[in-house]
Image (cartoon, rainbow, N blue to C red):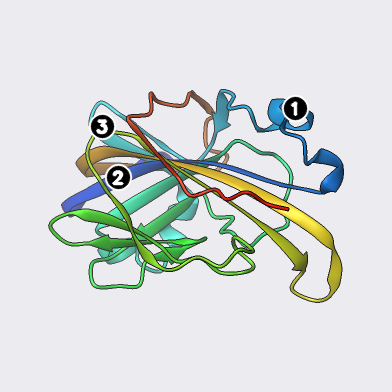
Amino acid sequence: MKPQSIVLKKPIQVIQLFRNINTYGKEEKSFDDRKEKIAWKPIQSTAGYVKDEVVHLPESIVEQPNFEHFDLLLIIDDNFHTSQNVVYTEKKNLCFRRNSQNKFDFLQLKLDDKIELYLKPGYFEVGDPPRSEFKVCELTKDKPISIKINGKRDASLTWRRERTFVEQEYIFHYLGDFKECVVVKEPFPTTVKTIPTIIKTIDLTKTLY
């Protein structure tokens, strides 16, 4: 299959999300023990990219339920290579629509005149202490925002176990609105991405014992 160019019926908003998720035990409770593991590094991405006002995406995007009528695309790249013991989506791309739930991981996107980001924390996504749901921020074009959150858990989805801790950082970069998309058959070519300069950091971390 050759790359398939798609002219969209309307412009879509595109957000690049960089995720850093780390779960660890009490043996790594000192930050010095894990700072190298959680340091941001250049990412070998196969999730998609924007070049010359065109969105390039892997063929798997067409499997998204909202692909035919989506308003916003989330491109997800991770700074970790092993599965983490929290609940998070493992998809590379998410298609969202206006007037829909648009929930993923511990967050929710609301689309109207603005792109609003809400905290929707759960025990298996974040852990304790419990947090209230609230509007975290609005996403503005070319103004990357970092959100940090942490928690602790004493149980998994199936059984109780030794206490684990989780720290997460999500960097959102609203790239703009685009009308042309190119869908490429797998394997999608790898591109190297680096973390953008952060304009604002929202730190929701707590002291954990």
SS class, disc 2 = strand
State the residue in front, 51 or 131.
131
| In-image side of 205 versus 9 (left or right) | right
| Sequence-earlier tag: 2 or 1 | 2
Which label sits in the foreground, 1 or 3? Answer: 1
User: Disc 1 vs disc 3: Cβ atoms closer than 8 Å?
Assistant: no
Rounded to the nearest angstrom, the CA distance separating label 1 from label 3 is 32 Å
Q: Residues within 10 Å of mark 1 (few under 14, many from 20)?
A: few
Rounded to the nearest angstrom, the CA distance separating label 3 from label 2 is 11 Å
Rounded to the nearest angstrom, the CA distance separating label 2 from label 1 is 36 Å
Q: Residue at x 77, y 35 (%)?
A: 30
Amino acid beneath label 3: Asp
What residue would you read off at disc 3? 142
Amino acid beneath label 2: Val
| Sequence-earlier tag: 3 or 2 | 2
Is residue 178 among the parts visible in the rendering? Answer: yes
Residue 132 circle label: none
Q: Residue at x 63, y 27 (%)?
A: 39
Q: Is residue 138 above or below residue 196?
A: below
Where in the figure is residue 174, as x and y percent of width and height? 29, 40
What residue would you read off at disc 2? 14
Amino acid beneath label 1: Asp
SS class, disc 3 = loop
Q: Is residue 204 above or below residue 174?
A: below
Where in the figure is residue 154, as x and y percent of width and height? 78, 66
Where in the figure is residue 82, as x and y percent of width and height? 74, 44
| In-image side of 60 versus 165 (left or right) | left
Q: Residues within 10 Å of mark 3 (few under 14, many from 20)?
A: some
What residue would you read off at disc 1? 32
